[in-house]
Every structure is written in structure tokens, then in C-alpha cells.
Image (tube, helix red, strand yellow):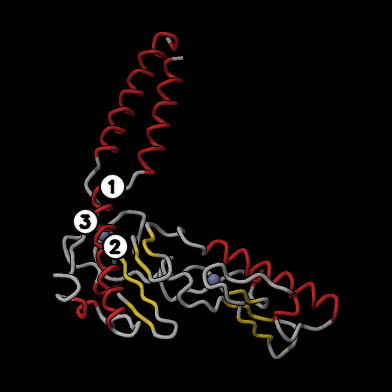
Amino acid sequence: MAMVRIILLTLLLVGTGEARPRPNELGCQKNLRDLGTAIEMYSTDNQGQYPSSLKAICPQYLASIPTCPSARVDSYSASYTSERRPDSYVVYCCGSFHPSHVNHPAFTSVHGLVERPGATTLGTCQENIKRAAQLVREYRKKHKKLPDKLSQVAAPVCPGSSAEYLYHPRPNRQDFVLECGGLSAHLGDNIRPYQPRYDSAASAGVVSEVSPVVAAGPPQPEPLGANQMQLAGLMALAVFLGLVTLGPRAR
Ligand SMILES: [Zn+2]
Ligand SMILES: [Zn+2]
């Protein structure tokens, strides 16, 4: 019984430990928020246009480019990209300074802070694009031809951009390609260039995989946080107590 209780306690602590961002990550998130604020201030003074590089915001809108506590170098400037019409930008902590969160946290004009991959509407967009493809296939089966326009099948739209998917019937009039046209809709997710895409001619018509832009920067694991230290101690204790409890019975 004691063993069960210890295991449950350990599992509980594992859960809460993972949910809480590490101190270095919080510092990095704050840096990105500060950068976002400065970038917005710049755009207000420049007819809505975002700066072409982060250099443009210093020192008028931000004293200097902050440093991520994990990276200890400027891990933001190289990642910054902006676009015009629609005006958008993305900036992120470039590299693997926060383990398992490559190129994150990120900050985008569309989503604000994106703490980790998969925290935006990308998953829903992938589901929607598959649903749209299904509707096109049903239309093709019923009418023996592809629809001319996607609006003929009342397809769902991308949740990030609220825009209809780009629809390209192939010359053979049987196959088609659907693409998420919202260039800035999923900027925070495994960053760019990335758009969910469906090709009915590809094997199983799968939505293309995420292709992360992994920029230079050696992997530098963060030192163990307080939570993990605590956890490691508890695990050891659980194993020890387990051995003590089970020991006599095993013999
Ligand atoms: Zn960082
Ligand atoms: Zn989309």
C-alpha cells in the first residue's frame, strides 16, 4: 500500500513539474514579450510596418537586444522575420536552448507568445484541410469530376487565418492539391516555411510534415531545475522504500 501511495505521489509530482516552465524559460518568454512590445511601438510610428531587422528597434524602443538566460548570447536577432501585406512578424529563441522546445518560445504578431510547438491552431488546420479534401473527394465521386471552386463543397477554413484553403485541381482533372494560404497563420509552430498541404496524388494524400527551420546554435541543456532535483530525490526514495517493503516477501 505504501508503495502504491509513493508511486501515485511521484506521478503527481511528475505531472506538475512538467506543466511549470523552468526559470530560464520564463526569462526567455519575458524577453520575447519585451521585444514584441518594442516591435509594435515601432510599427505604430511607421504606418503599421514592422522593422526589417531587430537592429531597427534599438535603442529607441528597447535599450538593447536582451539575452536568453539559457543561451547567454543573442538568440533572437537571427530568427526575426517580417512580412508586408498582411504585415506580420515572428521572432523566437533560435536553437535548442530549451530542451524539447526547439526554436521556442516564439512571439508572433498573430499569436503573441507561443510557449512551445503545437500551442497554436496548427492541429485544427490539419484536421480541417483533411476534411476539405474529403468533401472534394465526395464531390468527385458524385459528379464524376472535380469541383471548379472549393466554395462548391462548403469546406472548412484555416482557423489561424480564417481564409479558405488554396485549391489547385491537377491537369488530369482527377487529382488536386489543397494548401493553407494563411502565411502568417501558423508562424509560431515549428516556424517557417510551413503550411499544411494536402496532395491527393501523394501516397495516402497525407498532409505534409512539419519542416522546422533549425538555425545554428549548439544544444545547451538547461541545468536541472528545482523541480527535477526534487523529483530525482523522490524517485530514489520510492525505489529504496519499494526494495525495503518488497525485500522480505521476495525471500
Ligand atoms: Zn531562450
Ligand atoms: Zn492553416
What's the CA distance linking mark 3 and mark 1?
10 Å
Indicate the position of residue 15 as horizontal and vertical percent values.
41, 38
Q: Amino acid at mark 1?
A: Arg
Q: Quadrant of residue 220?
A: bottom left
Using the rendered view, name the quadrant where residue 115 is placed: bottom left
Quickly name the residue at label 2: 33
| Residue drawn at the location 38% of the way across and 64% of the way down | 112
**Helix or strand or loop: what does disc 2 sit on?**
helix
Ligand 1 neighbours mark 3 (CB distance < 8 Å): yes
Query: Marks 2 and 1, Cα distance to the nearest angstrom?
Result: 17 Å
**For residue 220, above or below residue 226:** below
Closer to the observer: label 3 or label 2? 2
Q: Residue at x 72, y 73 (%)?
A: 154
Residue corresponding to mark 1: 22
Q: Which residue is mark 3?
A: 70
- Residue 78 percent coordinates (x, y): 26, 74
- Mark with earlier residue (3, 2): 2
Q: Residue at x 34, y 44 (%)?
A: 20
Choose the circle earlier in sequence order: 3 or 1.
1
